[in-house]
Structure formats: C-alpha cells, structure tokens
Image: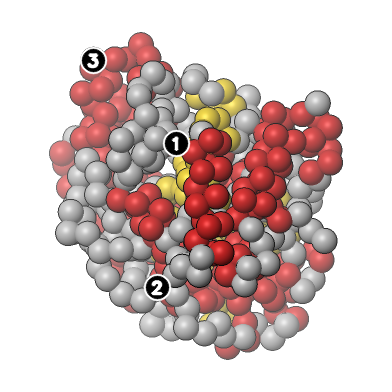
C-alpha cells in the first residue's frame, strides 16, 4: 500500500471521513517524509510539530466522536512563510523579520483553512517578501528542486511546491503575482491555481486598486486544488474585489468538449526551444484524443512596460519606507524593484493603466470564441539555484529579473484566473507544466477545464505527472 503521505488530498480526506485513516497516522507519515527528504531540499524551513501533533490528535478524536468534519479535516497543509499562523513565526524570508515572535492570531485566509479542519504546523521557504522566482534568502538559504536539488523550484512559492511534490504535505498555500504559484508548480511537477482577484481576499494588501497579487492553493492535481480553494475562499469587505459565489466545478467535461486556444508564447514571451518542443508534443497528444485546439491568443499589448509601471506603484506603496530605514538587511530583488520603481514617472504609470484597461477588454472578449487558453506554464526548464534568473531565453536577453516570467504575468495583468498542471517531463528530464487560462471570474470553469486536460494527459506516460525519486532524495539527505 502507498504511504499515507502520498495519497491525494481527496483520497486522504475520504479515508479520514470513513474512519479508515487516522489523522495522526497521516501527520506522522508526512513528518517522516519531511525527515527523510527535507535535509536535501530545504523546503520546510520552520514550524512546530508539537502543535501539529496536538491538532492531529484533536482531529482524530473528532472522527471517533462522530463530530461534523470540515472539508479539509485532518489534512496537513504547508503554509508559505508569508501569512500569519497563530503559534508560528512569519519571517517572510527576510532578516527584517527573522527574530519576530510567533503570531497570536491567524491571517483571515489561514483562519478559513483551520475552520475547515486543516493541520497547520509547517512553514515553507520563499524569496524575501516573495520577490523573485528563485526560492532562496539570507534567513533560510536556497530550496532545491525535488528532481535535481542543485536546481531551483522557482518561486516565490517554491518551498510549497517542493513540499507537495515530495509528500511532506498533500496541500500547501501559495501566492501569485507574476507566476509565483504557477511557475513553481511547473518546475516541480505539481498543480497550482491562481484565483480571480478577490476569490481569496487580500485583506492586508498595501493597495486595493491593483489586484495583481492573490493567494491560492497548491496540490498534486488540479482536482485537489479545487478541494482546497473551496475551503479557503470567502467574502471580506476589506478587499473591494472580494465576492461570494460557487467555486467548485459542478461537473468536469470531457476534454473533447472544450474549445481550447493554444499558444506557445502568448505572442509576447521569449520561450526556449525545448519548452516549445515539449508544448508541441502535448498538443499532439491532446489532438490525437480529439481535443478542439485553435491556434490563437489575445493581444496583450505592451505588457512588459505595463508590468514595470504598475509594479512600481505596488512596490513603492508596500516597501519604499522599509527600504529607506532598513536597506542593509534587504536582498537584491526587493531593492531592485524599489530602485527601479523610483525612476518610473507618473506619465508612464498613466499610460500603463490605460494600456492595461485596453488589454483587459481584448482579453475578456477573446473568450467569446473559446473556453480556455492553453500555454506553457514556464518559458525555461529549471535552472541552477545559484543563478538568480535566466539571463537569456530563446536567444533573447532578459533586461530585468522578471522578464522571463512573461508567460505568467501577461495573464495576471488581464485579471485572469489560471491553473498550472503537471504534464510530464521536458527533453532535459525535468518537470514540464501547462497553464490553463480563463477570464476573470471563471474560477470554477477554468478549474474544470484544467482537471479535464490533466486527466487526459495522465493517460499517456509521457505527459502524466512526474514523481520525484524519494529514495534518492533520502539517500542524498544522509
């Protein structure tokens, strides 16, 4: 029988509800896996197992007592180190917060997970304040990719992706601005979902007029992401984008019933030849199954300039004062963002806002003729974590550390919802992921399409979810 930690979240929850899997046994299986592989990967960077065991024992008593059980009852969830969890510290991967005391209250999203029955005790690594797509910082060091620990899991939710991929937890939280959920999912062979703005309210955001940053779920499948999203979504008036509504797919269509637009580069992103080739091979598999594939994509406009100017507003609002008073303790990516933001003019911001509005309207209209847009989730194969970011992609020089993430940030700027799903390995034997993109407020439909595409690809060994070599990772951990 498979180890409990390797079960899907849905199957583990079903077995817990049926009294066939004790939450304590699942907790012990996940922590045993963490002990075996985390020394080689550095994904879970701190936490409190005593607290976790107490939660697991309480969950076990609730099952045995016949209590009503929440949708995540007894499931360990790894928490990215950027949201407050009562009893645990939140370092944000920064020396500025490295000595902070444990939180006394849960972040509202965390409170939702706890109310749904989740076990919350482990924190996962991220770049400082989530700024960067390479998970390393001066507090905890670098996190390794579970398919090659010398390579990056990307970021900023890299620790969460590694924890899920290796069975340290069946579910994890992440956040996404320019691909911080989607790119790590692709690099680690798991699934991540970027909800529409407001689906999971950002109650502590520095600004509310730019809803680029969102929180979302990470799991080993899009179906498990849907389970977690239904529990973590809520309505909160502190986020003006927040709205109630059904989020779980009512039904999952056959992949042949979905009108799928396809693009290897979204018309605006540099993409390595190997990624293009892997994408073409997946399209051939779907086509052979009878999928309706239409070569097309929206016009994203001057998306790189749009990102630079709108991101400047977000970083100045959130971090300018911190940089001014504590620059010596801050890392390269954050300083680079704030320093570049200082050079952006109000005219550039105004132009970017106007271009973004036009791009959003074109993007929304695009879905009058198709159901979803399919693209690679990342433009390159995982690279060594000593490298901060790829300096060239597809022969094109990257002028900022963000540019290689255009496949992800172009949909972000059009308020898209998007799922990253595992789709086998690329020609370099590293994980390859696809991005299933839908318009704003299409969370349930986009998740349903992602589940359908993932299920179809899982039928072919080349495009099924890759699994890390746990034995080799444990041996490397010593």
Residue 181 can be seen in this image: no
> Could you tell which of marks 1 and 3 lies nearer the N-terminus?
1
| Label drawn at residue 247 | 2
* CB-based contact (under 8 Å), mark 1 and mark 3: no
| Badge 2 element | loop
304 sits left or right of 322 in the view: right
**Horizontal and vertical percent position of residue 442:** 39, 73
Query: What quarter of the picture does the C terminus occupy?
Result: top right
**Horizontal and vertical percent position of residue 468:** 76, 47
Query: What quarter of the picture does the N terminus occupy?
Result: bottom right
Residue under numbered circle 1: 81
Look at discs 1 and 3 and give the one toward the viewer. Answer: 1
Q: Which quadrant of the view contains residue 53?
A: top right
Residue under numbered circle 3: 325
Look at discs 3 and 2 and give the one toward the viewer. Answer: 2
| Badge 1 element | loop
* CB-based contact (under 8 Å), mark 3 and mark 2: no
Q: Which residue is at the front of the view, 157 or 314?
A: 157
Mark 2 neighbour class, 10 Å CA radius: few under 14, some 14 to 19, many 20 or more: many
At x 62%, y 72%, the residue is 18
């Amino acid at each position: 029988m498979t180890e409990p930690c390797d079960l899907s979240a849905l199957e583990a929850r079903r077995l817990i509800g049926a009294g066939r899997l004790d939450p304590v046994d699942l907790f012990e299986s996940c922590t045993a896996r963490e002990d075996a592989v985390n020394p080689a990967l550095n994904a879970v960077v701190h936490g409190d197992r005593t607290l976790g065991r107490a939660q697991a024992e309480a969950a076990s008593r609730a099952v045995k007592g016949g209590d009503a059980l929440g949708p995540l009852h007894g499931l360990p969830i790894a928490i990215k180190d950027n949201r407050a969890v009562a009893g645990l510290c939140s370092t944000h991967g920064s020396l500025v917060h490295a000595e902070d005391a444990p939180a006394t209250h849960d972040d509202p999203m965390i409170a939702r997970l706890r109310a749904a029955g989740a076990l919350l005790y482990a924190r996962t690594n991220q770049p400082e304040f989530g700024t960067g797509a390479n998970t390393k910082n001066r507090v905890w060091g670098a996190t390794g990719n579970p398919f090659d620990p010398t390579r990056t899991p990307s970021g900023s939710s890299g620790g969460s992706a590694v924890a899920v991929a290796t069975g340290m937890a069946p579910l994890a939280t992440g956040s996404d601005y320019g691909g911080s959920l989607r790119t790590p999912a692709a690099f680690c062979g798991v699934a991540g979902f970027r909800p529409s703005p407001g689906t999971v309210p950002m109650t502590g955001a520095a600004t509310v007029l730019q809803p680029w940053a969102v929180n979302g779920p990470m799991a080993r499948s899009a179906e498990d992401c849907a389970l977690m999203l239904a529990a973590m979504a809520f309505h909160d008036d502190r986020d003006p984008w927040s709205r109630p509504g059904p989020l779980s797919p009512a039904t999952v269509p056959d992949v042949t019933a979905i009108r799928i637009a396809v693009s290897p580069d979204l018309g605006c992103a540099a993409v390595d030849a190997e990624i293009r080739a892997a994408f073409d091979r997946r399209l051939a598999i779907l086509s052979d199954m009878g999928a309706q594939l239409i070569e097309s994509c929206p016009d994203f406009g001057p998306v790189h300039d749009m990102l630079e100017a709108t991101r400047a507003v977000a970083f100045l609002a959130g971090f300018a004062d911190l940089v001014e008073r504590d620059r010596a303790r801050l890392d390269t990516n954050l300083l680079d963002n704030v320093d570049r933001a200082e050079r952006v003019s109000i005219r550039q911001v105004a132009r970017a806002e106007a271009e973004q509005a036009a791009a959003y309207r074109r993007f929304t209209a695009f879905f009058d003729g198709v159901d979803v847009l399919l693209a690679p989730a990342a433009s390159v194969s995982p690279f060594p974590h000593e490298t901060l970011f790829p300096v060239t992609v597809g022969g094109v020089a990257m002028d900022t550390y963000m540019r290689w993430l255009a496949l992800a940030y172009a949909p972000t700027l059009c308020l898209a919802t998007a799922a990253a799903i595992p789709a086998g390995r690329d020609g370099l034997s590293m994980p390859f992921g696809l991005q299933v993109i839908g318009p704003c407020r299409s969370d349930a439909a986009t998740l349903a399409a992602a589940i359908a595409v993932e299920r179809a690809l899982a039928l072919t060994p080349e495009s099924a979810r890759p699994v890390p070599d746990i034995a080799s990772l444990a041996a490397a951990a010593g």
